[in-house]
Amino acid sequence: MRAFVWAITFALLVLASSAMALQAVDAEGLIQQGNYLEQNERAAVYKSLPQTSGNQTYWVVSVTLNDSLKLLVPLNDLDSKLVDKGNLRNELVSANVLVQRLGVVKGSTQWLISLTTANKLEELANALENETFDVDVVVNGIDSPNSATLRTNIAGLKSKLSTMSSELKDASAQIRELVQDETQLFNVEIDTEKVLDLESDYLGVYDKIASVKEKASEYDGVVAQFKNSIAQLDDVEAQTKTQLIGLLSPLASNQSITGAIAPYASISADNQQRVSTEYASLAAKTTNYNAELEKRVARVQSYAAIYLEDTAFKSQTTYSTLEQAAKTILSEQNKPQWKNQSEVNKLATLWTQVQDQFKKAQYATALETAAKAKASARMIKRDGIQVARDEPFNLSSAIITALALILGGFAVILILKNVAKKMQEVKEE
């Protein structure tokens, strides 16, 4: 009759209390054995990671179908209870979605946050810092009485180099911190608050890389002008000009700062777009997952109300479940025996409705209908069965019966007399 039979009731899942803390496998088992899963769905805690909020630990169980996430079920670690609907549940679900999604993004593209990137950016920062000495050499090497303004302007490059170097070192330090955070959050324990705050940390790195890229473009443009100005000096020897121009190319192989930062700027821009997309869509995803969870909770409750044992209902009616009550009361043999036939008819209607509503996934409505059906069953049981009564005395029937008996008696007498007469005649003959 039913497509599935569940071993543990919603009450056991939501109301059970345990002195022992859960493990990932325990949380998964509660969801698997409860009435949360559709056909072919699978319940698993992401990487078996516990999740924290404040000082409390939770287990957020992912329900997936063919690796597609359908909903998330957060359970309290200490008492196995489903986390109540509200801000805490929203935050737990949001953080868990982010960890899973960022893990996918990180594994599907070049990821800026790595120790390799941090080291490279620090090397570039040091190279720019060292370039300030070359700028001084260039300024001192322009031994031309008519180039004071040029020397002053070239000296100004040092502040630009210092600014870019500082930003690159800050970005490198932030990346190192994010590497540690990602290792902890993605592989050890999901800290809800830290995950939700990650966006600002990511954006801080991306903004610094973008800022260095912009400043590098400006710097390289100014340097190109200075190189041209040095090349046009009439009172500086050609060999000296070549040497000075070479010193204004701060990196090896005459590479520009723009060229050096470009690969990281490209990765950074790509990562920023992906991360921002995940955070921008987070609210809608959380709403959808929570709506699906509420639907599944209603399913669990309605299934329990219809098919699982209800001790209070049993004490009032002797029937363990609504299903048992409906089948017993409405059986062909028992149905006409009940005194309250109007409630019997009502129960028949409600029982048909509640089964149909559950099959159509109208779980909230089914829960309400189940409550009404149980109330109807209680009334039927309370009023009891009909009492058998003697047939009322009917004078006309009695008279007719008496006359029939008298006439029958006379008929028997006449028959006996006639038989006796025949026998006498036979004897005489």
Image (cartoon, rainbow, N blue to C red):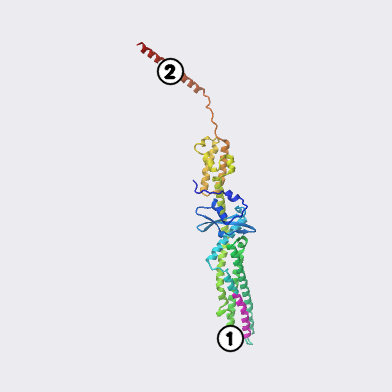
Which segment is the magenta one? Answer: 123-141
Q: Position of residue 51 (x, y in %)?
A: 60, 59
Q: Nearer the viewer, residue 297 or 424?
A: 424
The secondary element bearing badge 2 is classed as helix
Q: Is residue 137 magenta?
A: yes
Q: Residues within 10 Å of mark 1 (few under 14, many from 20)?
A: some
- Of tags 1 and 2, which is closer to the observer? 2
Which tag, 1 or 2, sits closer to the chain's start? 1
Say if 174 sits above or below 306 in the image: below
For this view, does 415 lie left or right of residue 46? left
The secondary element bearing badge 1 is classed as helix
Which disc, if any, is residue 241?
1
> Label 1 amino acid?
Lys
Circle 2 residue: 412
Residue most extreme to the top: 428
Q: Is residue 191 magenta?
A: no
Q: Residues within 10 Å of mark 2 (few under 14, many from 20)?
A: few
> Label 2 amino acid?
Val
Say if 287 sits above or below 413 in the image: below
Q: Position of residue 428 (x, y in %)?
A: 36, 10
Q: Quadrant of residue 99?
A: bottom right
